[in-house]
Structures are given as structure tokens and as C-alpha cells.
Amino acid sequence: KLTGPDGELDISLSYSFVLSERSLTVTAEVENNSPVCINELQTTAFSGIGALCGDGTQDNLLLPSTLGVNVPDPIHNDLYKFAPLVGRKYERPDQVRSYIDVPYPGVGTMQWFSLYNAKESIYVGNHDAKTRILSLHIERNAGEAALRMGVCQFPFIKNGESYVTPPL
């Protein structure tokens, strides 16, 4: 349940996960019947990724910033070292988590990123027919040695409106 200064907010959120032979598609649907405007919505496509295979030291994170930024061993590497190259740090840093948000359009030149190694990859892309402002969101949890990857959108959903995210 979501609450605001005046009590519980009438907002519903549901996620859809559709698995096909070689892909997972994620969408979120929000219905806002509250007096607040929903400015930001984060859709996480993958969470808890420890490594693609082995210990993860051979994994890389490819980010579409200018001509591309490659982050080696992102599960064990402090993502904040790469934030000046790709976007902004998350506002609440702590000793366990580091975050990167790559704004698109802007520093982010495309609406996708990939975790990969020589044998396999995970691609996270925003498949929207319209160009909208969004942020590619990557979170590293050092305590769990895991990544969380998704997209933050800014739909500005007012009272009585609903919104379905483009597929990730």
C-alpha cells in the first residue's frame, strides 16, 4: 500500500512477465486514482544477477554513452567510478549499493544496455515507438554481489489516468 501525507493512495501497479523461447518481456501498468501525480516509474527487468557464468569476472556491462562505455566485471566493480562517463550517480549512495542512471536522450545515445561475456549476454532495451525521456538504471549490490537492471520512465500520470510502459 502506498501512503501520502493524507493517508493511503489509490494507485494500482501490476507487472507482466512474458517468457518466450529466448526472451523475457516485461511491462508495467499503473492506474492512478489518487490526488498525486506519479512522476517516475522504475521497471526492473532483471534483479539478483550474480554472474552470467562462473564468478562474473569475465562479464562486462556495455552502456550506450556517446560511443559506448564498457564496464568490466560490473558485479565486483564500483559503478560510481563510471558515473561521470555515462550519466549520474543515484542520490542515496551507501556502502553496499552503487547505481548508475544513463539519461536518454542525452548522454545515453540509445535505449538499451547489455551485460555480456564471450559466451552469452542479457540485453535490456526499451521498445517504445515514441521517443520519451527515460533513464537506463543499473544497480550493484556489493553485499549480495548482484546486479539489478531496468529502466526509469517519467510518465507524469495524473488522477484518473493509467499508463502501460513500453515493453522491456
Image (cartoon, grey):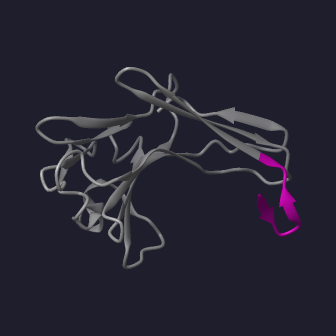
The vertical placement of 141 against 86, above or below, is below
Q: Nearer the viewer, residue 151 or 88?
A: 151
- 54 or 151: nearer the viewer: 54
**Magenta stretch holds residue 2:** yes
Dominant SS type (magenta) = strand
Does 72 sit left or right of 32 as displayed?
left
Q: Which residues are magenta?
A: 1-11
Q: Is residue 79 visible?
A: yes
Observer-nearest of 76 and 70: 76
x and y percentages locating residue 87 in the rendered image: 35, 56
Q: Position of residue 118 (x, y in %)?
A: 11, 38
* Foreground pick, 1 / 5: 1
Q: Considering only vertical position in the picture, is 6 above or below 26? A: below
Residue under the point 56% across and 33% down: 27
Q: Residue at x 83, y 69 (%)?
A: 5
For the question of whether residue 136 can be seen, the reply is no
139 relative to 40 in the view: left or right: left
Asked which quadrant contains residue 100, the reply is: bottom left
Residue 14 quadrant: top right
